[in-house]
Amino acid sequence: MNLWAHIAQAISEATGKDFHLANQHAMGGGCINESNRISDGKRSFFVKTNSSVHGDMFEAESESLQELSSAGAIKVPQPICNGIFQQQCYLVLEYLDMRGSPDMAQFGQQFADLHRTSHNRFGWHRNNTIGSTPQVNDPMDEWVEFWRHNRLGYQLQLSASKGYGGELQRLGERLMLTCQCYSNRINHSHQCCMGIYGEVMHRR
């Protein structure tokens, strides 16, 4: 059994309906994963594949999409299944036809609604990736501290481990100190901060 036969079987098991691969078309739009649209002539799915070392990345993406969908604010592709076969990992998603002219006003409103979804703390229960770069999501009570440590601070650590130091680290540390100075001014509720951000997107 090859990878695509395995994926077809996984789709059949996940959906409860037999899926027999009839068409496969490579799709662009990214530089990290291989992307394909597959179809049996009736149903289509969007499939990402990569080296098996990125299996956790696809697991986190699948769970992230479920989290976004649970907000009920904006349409996102539904994850169907994911797994590892031999030396490759895969993520199967609902295929969304993106052709046509987008309604940007509607998108702005839905994006604002999505960002009004609030939780008690900033972060998430698991880490994920930005591209293929690890992204730390340790929950914190304050947004500024979350951004300083889990976004800017962590990226500075990664860059230092890759040999990027000097001016980059100096400026990064200076920015982190500046953020701390503004902490008390901008640490409002999650809903407030994200609502304002979403409203700006809507007005654009």
Image: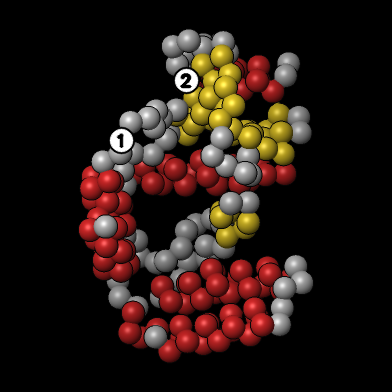
Residue drawn at point x = 67 percent, y = 72 percent: 157
Res 97 seen here = yes
> In the figure, is residue 6 to the left or right of 130?
right
Q: Which residue is more in the foreground, 132 or 89?
A: 132
The answer to which of 55 and 25 lies nearer the viewer is 25
Mark 1 surroundings within 10 Å by alpha-carbon count, few (fewer than 14), some (14 through 19), many (20 or more): few
**Residue 40, image x and y in percent?**
51, 12
Q: Amino acid at mark 2?
A: Ser
Q: Residues within 10 Å of mark 2 (few under 14, many from 20)?
A: some
Query: Left or right: 48 with respect to 65?
Result: right
Q: Residue 68 in the image: state x and y as whole percent.
A: 38, 46
Residue 85 image-quadrant placement = top right
Closer-to-camera residue (13/3): 3
In the image, 150: left or right of 115? Answer: right
On the image, the x and y values in percent for residue 173 come to: 59, 84
Q: As shown in the figure, which amino acid type bears the numbered disc 1?
A: Ser
Secondary structure, mark 1, is loop
Q: At 40% across and 83% down in the image, what residue appears?
A: 183
Q: Is residue 192 above or below residue 171?
A: above
State how far apart marks 1 and 2 are (Cα).
Answer: 21 Å
Q: Which mark is residue 38?
A: none
Q: Which mark is residue 44?
A: 2
SS class, disc 2: strand
Label 2 near label 1: C-beta < 8 Å? Answer: no
- Tell which circle, 1 or 2, labels the residue nearer the N-terminal end: 2
Residue picked out by circle 1: 101
| 118 horizontally vs 59: left or right | left
Quarter of the rendering occupied by the C terminus: bottom left
Residue under the point 27% across and 62% down? 200
Quadrant containing the N terminus is top right
